[in-house]
Image (cartoon, rainbow, N blue to C red):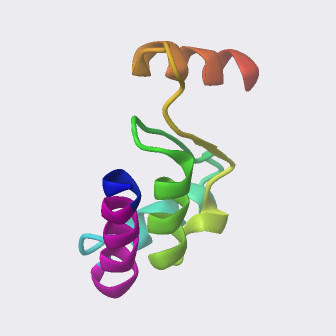
Amino acid sequence: KLEQQLTAYERRHIVQSGRLYDGVDNMLQELAAQGYILAIVSNGSEEYIECVLRTCKIYDMFAFIRGRRPNMSKADNVGELLEETK
């Protein structure tokens, strides 16, 4: 129950106050315009990642979004995504 309350609080805070660092949106747009495929691999949950991306209005820029996976290191998660996207 406490974890659910903390998650709900965190999501509300993201929606109310979340923002990108200056220049990040322009950088992402430029990378996409140059043909780069954008992806995120994070130790956070996919729900958390999506909340941040949607709040910052950049969700649609990413072709791949990968959150934490049980019993998988971040390096292994990145490696798996790279193999899947060859």
Whether residue 52 is situated above or below residue 39 in the rendered picture: below
Q: Is residue 18 left or right of residue 34?
A: left
Whether residue 12 is situated above or below residue 76 in the rendered picture: below
The image shows residue 46 at horizontal and vertical percentages of 55, 48
The image shows residue 56 at horizontal and vertical percentages of 45, 76
> Farthest residue toward the bottom?
16
- In the rendered image, residue 6 lying in the magenta stretch gets the answer yes
Please say whether residue 59 is visible from this viewpoint. yes
- In the rendered image, residue 82 lying in the magenta stretch gets the answer no
The image shows residue 60 at horizontal and vertical percentages of 66, 66
Most foreground residue, 71 or 36 = 71
Q: Main secondary structure of the magenta part?
A: helix
Whether residue 59 is situated above or below residue 65 in the rendered picture: below
Magenta part of the chain? 5-17
Please say whether residue 19 is visible from this viewpoint. no
Q: Quadrant of the N terminus?
A: bottom left
The residue shown at (40%, 69%) is 8
Which image quadrant is residue 21 in? bottom left
